[in-house]
Amino acid sequence: AEGLERHPSKFRVSADVAECVGLDIHGSGRILPTSKRMSLLVLATVELCCRYLVSAHVCSKVVGHWTWLVLLWRPGLSILQEVYPYAQSNSRSPCYFKSSVKEEFFLLLVFAPNLWVNMQQAWSPVIGATDASERGFGGVYTRVTTATSRMVGRLAEKRGDYVHLDGYGGSDDDDSGSDDASEEGQWRPWVGHRPRVGIPHRLPFGAWDFLTHLRGVWKYAEHINVLELRAALLHLLW
C-alpha cells in the first residue's frame, strides 16, 4: 500500500517462517500455533481446570482462544459439546465448574499436538458421495486423477456449481454419436434429465464407475438433516 510505513520489527526478507495472528506459517506450507501462544493457552487451561468456581465470562475467553486454534484441526470442534453452552451465558458471577466441561478442556490438551495443517498436501486420489433417507443410507467412491480431484475440490455450491455423474451426457437412447470428451463446454444431459438451476460440471466417468462401500439401515429415527450428516461422517471415517 503506497504511503504506509513498514514496521521495522515485523519486516522480514526471505524468512522461512512468518508469524500471523498467533500462527507460524512455514515456507513448506505448514501452519501451526506459535510456541508462545500454545504454552500460554495450555497453562491458562490447566489453571482454569484446577478451580472449583469459574465464571462463564472467564471460560468463554479461554474457549475462544481454543476455537481459533482448533480451526487448524476441525474435527477437534466435535470435542466441545458442554463448553459452549456453559460459556454462552457470559455471566461474570463464579459458579460451580462442571466436571463435564473440565473433561472437554483436558481432551483439548491431549489433542493439542494435532493442531496444525499442511496447505501443500496432495489432492485426494478418490472422491465420494453419500445419501440418506429416513430408512437407510449409502456411500460410494471412485478413484480419480489429480486434475479431476482438484477440479471437484474447487467447486462451490454457493456459486451454483454441481457435478453431473453420468459421464459426458447422452444415454443408451441417445444415438447422436457424439461423446467426444474434447468438446469443451458441450455438456448434454441424459434423456429424462430435469433442468437444475446452477452451473453443471461434467466428470470424465459415469455413475457406474462408483463402488459402494457403505450401505445400511438406520436403527433410530432422526431428522433427515441429521441422517444426511451421519452418512457423511461414516463416509469420512471409512
Image (cartoon, helix red, strand yellow):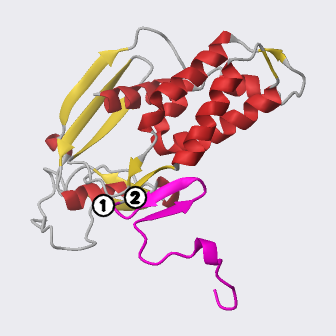
- The kind of residue on which mark 2 rests is Leu
Callouts 1 and 2 close, C-beta under 8 Å: yes
Q: CA distance from mark 1 to mark 2?
A: 7 Å
Q: Main secondary structure of the magenta part?
A: loop
Q: Secondary structure at mark 1?
A: helix
Picture coordinates of residue 2, whole percent (x, y)? 65, 91
Residue drawn 17% across the image and 56% down it: 145
Residue matched to label 1? 151
- Residue 208 horizontal side relative to residue 25, left or right: left
For badge 1, the amino acid type reads: Met
Residue name at image x 78 percent, y 31 percent: 58
Count of numbered tags? 2
Find out whether residue 70 is within the magenta segment: no
Nearer the observer, 203 or 87: 87
Split into 4 quadrants, where in the image is the N terminus? bottom right
Do we see residue 224 in this rendering?
no
Classify residue 61 as left or right of residue 138.
right
Span highlighted in magenta in the image: 1-28
Residue plotted at (30% across, 61% down):
151
